[in-house]
Image (tube, coloured by chain):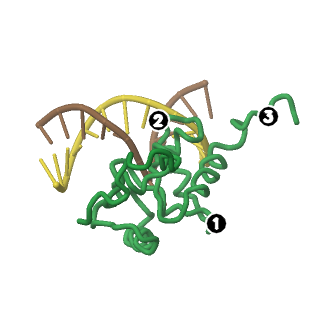
Chain colours: A green, B brown, C yellow
Amino acid sequence: MTPTMPGSLASFRARVLAAVRRIPRGRVATYGDIAELVGAPGAARAVGNVMRGCSDPSVPCHRVIAAAGALGGFGGYLDRKRQLLRAEGLEVTPTRIRGFAEVRWPVQPRTAGGGKATRRRPAPV
DNA sequence: ATCCTGACGCGCC
DNA sequence: AGGCGCGCCAGGA
């Protein structure tokens, strides 16, 4: 390909959408995480701007939340976001995702090695 | 090239 | 716990 075609050329937006698309169902990622994934640590805000124009149904923009498991935003339909997340089996409190660390992505599910590194069941409620 | 906006992040009150 | 303000970053006018 062209000598100058580092992935960086792909619009920040394109990279973000690609990353978001990789978020598995039932999992969530923060704007900051996405930013870092696309090689723009600290650009969480910019990521949010991208999501804002995310009209692509193939992009699970609802899986992108704010830091600490906060819901973040979703246009004027935050309720919609909670609904979608719940539909994926996530526990969502009125203000945040429950067990955020457990459903956060990307996360290394300890390649089924030793076994007990992280309790898959942190305890209900 | 400059200014302003924003689905953020984090510290502080 | 919850709410407020400042700082950061990329895009658009």
**Which mark, residue A70?**
none
Instruction: Classify 10 Å Cα crowding around label 3: few (below 14), some (14-19), many (20 and above).
Output: few
**SS at mark 1 in the image:** loop
Q: On what subunit does the disc labeled 3 rest? A: A
Front residue of A11/A99: it is A99
Q: CA distance from mark 1 to mark 2?
A: 25 Å
Q: Going from the N terminus, do you reach mark 3 or mark 2 first? A: 3
Residue A95, image quadrant:
bottom left
Q: On what subunit does the disc labeled 2 rest? A: A
Amino acid type at circle 3 is Met
Q: Going from the N terminus, do you reach mark 3 or mark 1 first? A: 3
C6 versus A11 height, above or below: above
Q: On what subunit does the disc labeled 1 rest? A: A
Q: Are marks 1 and 2 on the same chain?
A: yes
**SS at mark 2 in the image:** loop
Amino acid type at circle 2 is Gly
Percent of width and height locating residue A6: 75, 33
Taking the spot 57% from the left edge, 58% from the top edge, the residue there is A53
Percent of width and height locating residue A43: 49, 38
Q: Are marks 3 and 2 in contact (CB under 8 Å)?
A: no
Taking the spot 55% from the left edge, 60% from the top edge, the residue there is A24
Percent of width and height locating residue A112: 51, 50
Residue indicated by mark 2: A42
Residue indicated by mark 3: A5
**Which mark, residue A58?**
1
Q: Are marks 3 and 1 in contact (CB under 8 Å)?
A: no
Percent of width and height locating residue C8: 44, 30
Front residue of A2/A21: it is A21
